[in-house]
Every structure is written in structure tokens, then in C-alpha cells.
Image (spheres, rainbow, N blue to C red):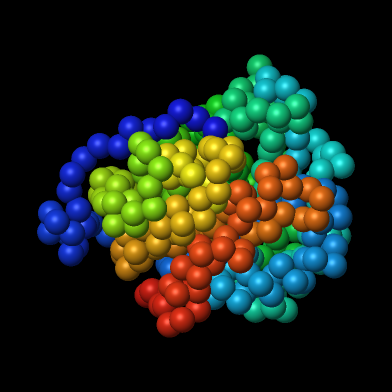
Amino acid sequence: MLLAAALLLAGCSSGPGGEGGEEEPGPSASTRPGDGRAAGMRGITLPSWNTGDYSSPEAAAYLRQIAATGARWVTFTPTWYQDGAADAGMHTTGETTGDDALRHVIGLAHRTGLKVMLKPHVDLAKGGDRSGIRPRDAGAWFTAYERFITHYAQLAEGTGAERFAVGTELAGTSRDGARWSKVVRAVRARYRGPLTYAANYDEYRTVPFWDDLDDIGIDAYWPLADRPTADAARLRDAWKPITQELAAFSARHHRRILFTEAGYVSQRGATTAPYSWTVSKSAGEDEQAAAYEALLSALDGKPWWAGVCWWMWDDWPDSGETPRRLAYTPHGKPAEKVLRRHWADGGTEGTGGAG
């Protein structure tokens, strides 16, 4: 997630049933393969931080817990690393999940009744924001990136993963439309399912290659408040100008918008900076739950919205840097009850649902 300065929200119109009474435009018909297959996605991300996470005994239990919320999708995030933001390539480390472990967990997910989105990440080995990756030699970096991403595209095809993300929050490179289009073509040559790119909430407008993809992916970490609040109605109102903008953006590109990530730590002030792991040291489970409620009630039923993959389920034993009671996981917190109410207790996945 991008640890960026908070985006100022503006605008006052609302969608159907809102105060403005204006109808938000939906996407026009598209002939891209897989269009509509992400509609109403109910997903939760299970990231990995070490080579063996996805083959550990906890993996099966986590997947059963995810499915019990009413989720129908799980996202996995194999990660390679760069030593420096200007380097020309990326590599595996001891924190990169092994291919066999990744194949294992995809099989487990399918046997649990979950569909899979594979969403490979590139991070900086010494810490820092991946949006700061700006290679000195762009040509060499894209050559290396294509090798990295097509490796996972082939793995996704071989394991039957139902969706694939060609990149995540690489704002320092994502304006290079020609090179990214070449990457997408290389991925399509190896993977037959629907593709997206996971742009950060303050990046998506400048991505020039949306028309090469099947869905517009956004990591939806918009700040919703300027002070801590557990008022779900207030937070839902904060979504109104955002949803109006997203509806228009979807219509311009004839693509639905998938929230490839969204999430809130269970800390006081989480809604002021959803992208931050460390907003405060005070627990804020009610604020986290209100944010979940606001997002789902504000977005459910929008014709241009393709669903959400929440960040994230439990950390692996001994790997979490943030105490569980303050972390992004909704597990065992009021936010999980919100998910179950929307997803497991009679919620719908929408027209053309992927569940």
C-alpha cells in the first residue's frame, strides 16, 4: 500500500438514491475477453512474507476462515524485491514464497471453494514505497519485469487461477504506456484469463494502458475523514464524490472498476489514512467496522463496480510487525461481522457475478 500524503476529497453529487438523485453512468459494453466476470467479486487477500507461508499448516485454516465470511475469492501475493529504487531488476529473497508453496495454496483455495486472483508484487528490499521505483535504465527494468511477471502468468495458467494482476502500485513506471502494453501482451500470450493492474487510489488517473486490460484495478485507500470517527453514515457520505468520479472514469474506459485492495487497520484514526499500518497505538475496532460498512453500503449495486478484495486476513505466526488487535485483519473483530452480514447472510454478488 502506498504510504502517500492524504488525497483531498472534493465534489458533492451522489449516485442513485443519494441526496443529489443523479444517476451514475455505468460502463458501456466491451468485447474484451472475460468482461463482467469480476462483477460483484467478494475477496480477501492472504499475503505471504516468507518462502514457506503458503505451504504451512495454517494455510488451510486461513482459507476456511476466509470462506466462512462469505468470500468467494482469495488473492495471493508472491513478492520479489529490488535492492534500490533505481535498479534495473528484481530478485527473489527468503521472503519470496516458493513456487511449489504457491501451487499448493492455489490448490487448497480451489478445494475450499474459493476462486483465486494472483497478484504478484515488487517491493524494495530495504523498505520504502514501491511507487518510488524509478529505474535509471527503463528498458532493462521492463525486460526484467516481463520475465518476472510472465513467470507468474504461466504459473497462474497452469494452476487454473481465475484472475491475474499484471502489476501493483508501480506509479514510478506506470505512465510508460508503450512498455506496459508490451508487458500485457506478453502476459496474454501465457495466460488466458482476465487481467487487471492494481493502481493506487492516487495513481489510476495517469495509467495509460487501461484499454489493454479487462478491468480497472484500484487499491482503494482514499482517506474518508479528517479526524477519527466510527460514524458509518458520515463515512458513506465521504464516498459520494469518489463514486461519482469512478463511475465517470469507468464509462470513459468501458471497463468496470475492481477494488484490488481496500482495508483499514483497527486503530483509532484508520479512516484518516487507510494506507497506513501505524495510524495510532490506540485500538479502533469500531472505526474499522464502520469503514467496512460504509464501503460496502456505498458501493454495492453500482453497475460499474466489480467488487473488492480486502487487505488482509491474518498474518502468519511470528511474522506480523503490527499487533493483531491493531492490524488490518478483520478476523474476530466487528468488521468480520460486517462482512458476514453483507456476504454470508444473504448478500448478492450482482449481475454476472464471479462467485
In this rendering, the answer to whether 123 lies above or below 75 is above
In this rendering, the answer to whether 152 lies above or below 110 is above
Q: Is residue 226 visible?
A: yes
Residue 224 in the figure: left or right of residue 13? right
In this rendering, the answer to whether 124 lies above or below 261 is above
Residue 93 sits in which quadrant? top right
Residue 65 is situated, as x and y percent measured from the top left of the image, at: 66, 72
In this rendering, the answer to whether 130 lies above or below 58 is above
- Residue sitting at 55 percent across and 38 percent down? 280
Residue 206 is situated, as x and y percent measured from the top left of the image, at: 41, 33
Residue 67 in the figure: left or right of residue 178? right
Give the total of numbered labels: 0
Q: Residue furthest bottom?
A: 346
- Residue sitting at 61 percent across and 66 percent down? 332
Q: Residue furthest front?
A: 282
- Residue sitting at 38 percent across and 74 percent down? 350
Residue 66 sits in which quadrant? bottom right
Residue 212 is situated, as x and y percent measured from the top left of the image, at: 48, 48
Q: Is residue 193 visible?
A: no
Q: Residue furthest top?
A: 136
- Residue sitting at 46 percent across and 28 percent down? 5
Q: Dividing the image into 4 quarters, which one contains the N terminus? A: top right
Residue 91 is situated, as x and y percent measured from the top left of the image, at: 80, 36
